[in-house]
Image: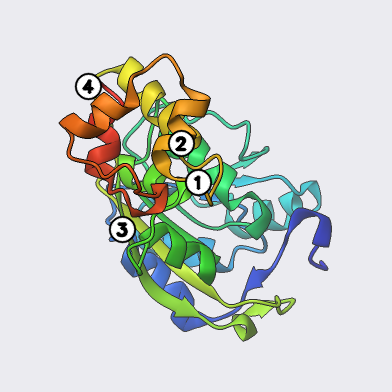
């Protein structure tokens, strides 16, 4: 069963990395786990061994017989053939734990963090540079880091070398943990929508100041007055503005 490049398949082979993923998920028997792209079931096996119920979502139809044979006799395992980008979780409160394809990382994070049925925790194996950017280690925010932080608490918990996969990718990876996922930062649905509209507008042109971007993209608001009230320097760039400020200016 050869990995398919078109599906971004890089099967995890590292036992230490697998242990780190399960530990980051803080999995207990009462948990409900959604695993995206189980592949050959390397991570799946360890998740099932925790006693939690594992729902594995696999897009590759060629892997379904293999996964069925390996795990479907287990009462704590459910296999779904489907696409993670169109899948709708039936209820909130689950944990999403997965080794996800690099090329859909952003889309996966956006879909499940903003879904009406959110997970409480996400532990995903992603490209290391993406994990670093999400956590904004150098204090420089991005649309991605702000989007994740608006819903939860991200942390890079374990670095995974490129040799931990088959086939070997061209970059290193990292285990990204996002805990305490909720909508507590938003007052209502309108606030949530405006937050993302303003963040995207603020990052429209990286070389421009935040004020210039907002005045261009959302001209109906007196942004100079907003900046004055919130004590934001007019020469501030979007990457230097913390989450709390974005949340405040998006509800005024």
**Residue at image point 42% right, 30% down:** 198
Q: In which quarter of the image is residue 66?
A: bottom right
Distance from Cα at disc 4 to Cα at disc 1: 29 Å
Q: Residues within 10 Å of mark 3 (few under 14, many from 20)?
A: some
State the CA–CA distance, disc 4 to disc 2.
Answer: 27 Å
Q: Which of 106 and 227 is in front in this view?
A: 227
Residue 100 in the figure: left or right of residue 170: left
Look at the numbered disc 2 and give the secondary structure of its residue. Answer: helix
At x 25%, y 25%, the residue is 225
Q: Where is residue 4 in the image (x, y as percent from the top left)?
A: 81, 61
Relative to 102, 221 lies left or right: left
Going by the image, does 1 lie left or right of 45?
A: right
Residue in the foreground of this view, choosing between 166 and 220: 220
Upstream in sequence: badge 1 or badge 3: 3
Disc 1 on helix, strand or loop?
loop
To which residue does mark 2 refer?
212
- Is residue 57 among the parts visible in the rendering? yes
Q: Residue visible at 62% across and 37% down?
A: 85
Gap in angstroms between the C-alphas marked 1 and 3: 44 Å
Residue 155's x, y, as percent?
A: 32, 63
Answer left or right for 245 relative to 65.
left
| Pointer 3 residue | 27
Please report whichever mark, 4 or 3, sits nearer to the chain's N-terminal start: 3
Is 240 located above or below residue 143 in the figure? Answer: below
Task: Identify the mark nearer the N-term, 4 or 2.
Answer: 4
Q: Name the residue under label 1.
A: 208
Callout 4: 10 Å neighbours few (<14), some, many (20+)? few
State the SS at label 3.
loop
Residue at 63 percent of width and 31 percent of height: 86
Of marks 4 and 3, the one in the foreground: 4
Q: Residue 136 carries which label?
A: none
């Amino acid at each position: 069963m050869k990995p398919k490049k078109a599906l971004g398949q890089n099967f995890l082979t590292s036992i230490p990395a697998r242990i780190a993923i399960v530990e980051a998920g803080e999995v207990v028997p009462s948990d409900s786990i959604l695993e995206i792209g189980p592949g050959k079931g390397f991570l799946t096996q360890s998740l099932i061994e925790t006693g939690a119920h594992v729902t594995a979502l696999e897009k590759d139809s060629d892997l379904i017989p293999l996964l069925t044979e390996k795990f479907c006799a287990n009462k704590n395992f459910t296999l779904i053939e489907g696409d993670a980008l169109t899948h709708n979780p039936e209820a909130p409160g689950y944990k999403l734990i997965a080794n996800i394809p690099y090329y859909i990382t952003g889309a996966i994070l956006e879909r499940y963090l903003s879904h009406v049925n959110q997970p409480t925790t996400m532990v995903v194996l992603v490209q290391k540079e993406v994990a670093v950017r999400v956590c904004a280690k150098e204090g420089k925010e991005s649309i991605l880091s702000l989007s994740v932080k608006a819903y939860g608490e991200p942390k890079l918990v374990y670095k995974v070398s490129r040799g931990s996969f088959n086939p070997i990718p061209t970059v290193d990876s990292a285990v990204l943990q996002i805990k305490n996922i909720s909508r507590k930062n938003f007052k209502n649905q309108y606030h949530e929508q405006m937050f993302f509209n303003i963040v995207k507008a603020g990052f429209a042109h990286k070389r421009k100041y935040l004020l210039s971007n907002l005045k261009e993209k959302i001209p109906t608001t007196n942004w100079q007055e907003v900046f004055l009230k919130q004590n934001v320097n007019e020469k501030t760039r979007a990457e230097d503005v913390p989450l709390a400020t974005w949340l405040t200016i998006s509800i005024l």
